[in-house]
């Protein structure tokens, strides 16, 4: 069986030019078998284990993993985090939150160890389970799920069944750790594995391989769609993504649905998007999903994450992120270029510290620079044509007396810099944008 996996690795060129590799290692059958496969290659392997702290036996699991790493003489990196607390804070399911933390950890280890790539032990059963999970949730884009190679991640076992892997390990007396949570039927994945897959296998011989071919066909269609929409103007920010409305309007309904599904998946969360959502999208309005908004404005389609933004203290010198912006602060004794874009200057002596940054509140008002009248933030957002779904994450900077800056829109008439100013605080900001 190892020979078959190595043939697939060569066929797909998964290890071409690779010398140093991070193996996501849980001690389970899949990562243990993949460890055996990779050990036969000319590679430097680093095992990386992430403890989710979800089970009472997690300490025993980690001890087993440390013992195994020592037995096979491989470097081991370990880390853990309270997944439940993280999921509660980020409004994620346990499975989703665990995946996010685990992948963040693996990428960090890869960078710290200067490795070339990350190897994961997902097998064909995992692929089939993912397919049905997405299908049962009404997903459009993403039914093809995992690939042999996806950026800096490889999955050499995607064409191999779990039972084949376990049989090999048992036949060769190779120890592995069985995760007891895999038998917990409160998880959808486990019900699909224990109840649905056996029924499908009994209905027709070779049904799993047929589904595998269907997944490959869907992947081909998804790649064709991506090429079709590559010319559409798409901009991704930390908390939202927007699409040129004119380009979006020229797509067929099915293409719109698949494109929006793909854009939602960029945030790494499962969504409940249905074709009816796209069909009912108002000419200028908002559709609300459980953890996101879809808004059509006069010139854009905007998809925004629902997210609570807590109040943060703004440092006198440093940087922080808020919403879709990166904010930097510095202290000066004079202003070199007062007209520079993305910069606001305040007389530090006229401010009541500390400075804080927050999202808008009901009833927020500001007296803008050069004005004597208070104006509601709501009216400012409307006048500036700020999309409704972006207003709740727009950065508002305050001192103890009130609002001093609505980032990029208005500054207060307080604390303006004059000849008498002794210290100037610069608040510099820019929107963070990513490629498609």
Image (cartoon, rainbow, N blue to C red):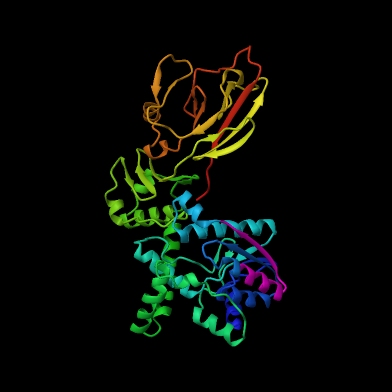
- Residue 72 seen in this snapshot: no
Q: Position of residue 101 (x, y in %)?
A: 55, 57
| Furthest residue in direction bottom, as rendered | 171
Q: Position of residue 102 (x, y in %)?
A: 56, 60
Q: Position of residue 259 (x, y in %)?
A: 39, 54
| Furthest residue in direction right, as rendered | 73
What is the span of residues highlighted in magenta in the rendered image? 62-81
Q: On the picture, is 39 further left or further right than 369?
A: right
The residue positioned 50% from the left and 36% from the top of the image is 311
| Furthest residue in direction top, as rendered | 420
The residue positioned 46% from the left and 51% from the top of the image is 88
The residue nearer to you, when weighing 137 against 63, is 63
Q: Position of residue 359 (x, y in %)?
A: 45, 35
The residue positioned 50% from the left and 40% from the top of the image is 324
Q: How many marks?
A: 0
Q: Is residue 73 magenta?
A: yes
- Residue 126 seen in this snapshot: yes
Image: 426 above or below 117 = above
The residue nearer to you, when weighing 95 against 129, is 95
Image: 145 above or below 85 = below
The N terminus, quarter of image: bottom right
Image: 198 above or below 86 = below
The residue nearer to you, when weighing 61 against 120, is 61
The residue positioned 50% from the left and 51% from the top of the image is 436
Image: 106 above or below 196 = above
Q: Is residue 39 magenta?
A: no
């Amino acid at each position: 069986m190892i020979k078959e996996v190595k043939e697939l690795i060569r066929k797909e060129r998964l290890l071409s030019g690779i010398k140093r590799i991070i193996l996501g290692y849980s001690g389970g059958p899949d990562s243990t078998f993949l460890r055996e496969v990779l050990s036969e290659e000319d590679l430097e392997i680093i095992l990386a284990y992430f403890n989710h702290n979800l089970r009472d036996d997690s300490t025993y699991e980690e001890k087993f993993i440390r013992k195994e790493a020592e037995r096979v003489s491989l470097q081991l990196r370990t880390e853990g985090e309270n997944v439940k607390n993280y999921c509660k804070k980020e409004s994620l399911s346990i499975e989703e939150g665990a995946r996010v933390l685990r992948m963040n950890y693996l990428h960090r280890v890869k960078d710290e160890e200067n490795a070339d790539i990350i190897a994961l032990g997902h097998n064909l059963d995992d692929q089939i389970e993912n397919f049905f999970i997405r299908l049962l949730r009404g997903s459009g884009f993403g039914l093809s799920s995992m690939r042999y190679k996806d950026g800096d991640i490889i999955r050499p076992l995607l064409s191999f069944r779990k039972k084949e892997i376990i049989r090999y390990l048992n036949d060769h007396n190779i120890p592995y750790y069985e995760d007891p949570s895999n038998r917990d039927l409160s998880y959808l994945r486990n019900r699909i594995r224990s109840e649905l897959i056996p029924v499908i296998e009994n209905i027709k011989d070779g049904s799993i391989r047929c589904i595998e071919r269907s997944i490959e066909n869907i992947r081909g269609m998804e790649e064709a769609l991506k090429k079709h929409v590559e010319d559409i103007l798409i901009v991704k920010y930390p908390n939202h993504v927007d699409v040129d409305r004119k380009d979006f309007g020229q797509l067929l309904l099915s293409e719109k649905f698949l494109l929006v599904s793909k854009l939602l998946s960029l945030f790494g969360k499962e969504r409940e998007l249905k074709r009816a959502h796209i069909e009912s999208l108002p000419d200028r309005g908002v559709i609300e999903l459980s953890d996101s908004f879809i808004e059509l404005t006069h010139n854009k389609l905007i998809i925004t994450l629902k997210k609570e933004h807590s109040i943060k203290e703004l440092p006198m010198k440093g940087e922080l992120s808020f919403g879709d912006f990166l904010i930097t602060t510095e202290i000066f004794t004079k202003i070199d270029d007062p007209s520079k874009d993305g910069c606001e200057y305040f007389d530090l002596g006229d401010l009541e510290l500390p400075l804080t940054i927050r999202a808008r509140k009901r009833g927020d008002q500001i007296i803008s620079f050069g004005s004597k009248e208070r104006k509601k933030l709501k009216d400012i957002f409307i006048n500036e044509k700020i999309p409704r779904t972006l207003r709740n994450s727009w950065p508002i900077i305050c001192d103890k007396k009130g609002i001093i800056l609505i980032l990029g829109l208005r500054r207060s008439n307080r604390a303006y810099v004059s000849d008498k100013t002794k210290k100037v605080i610069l608040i510099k900001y820019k929107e963070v944008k990513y490629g498609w």
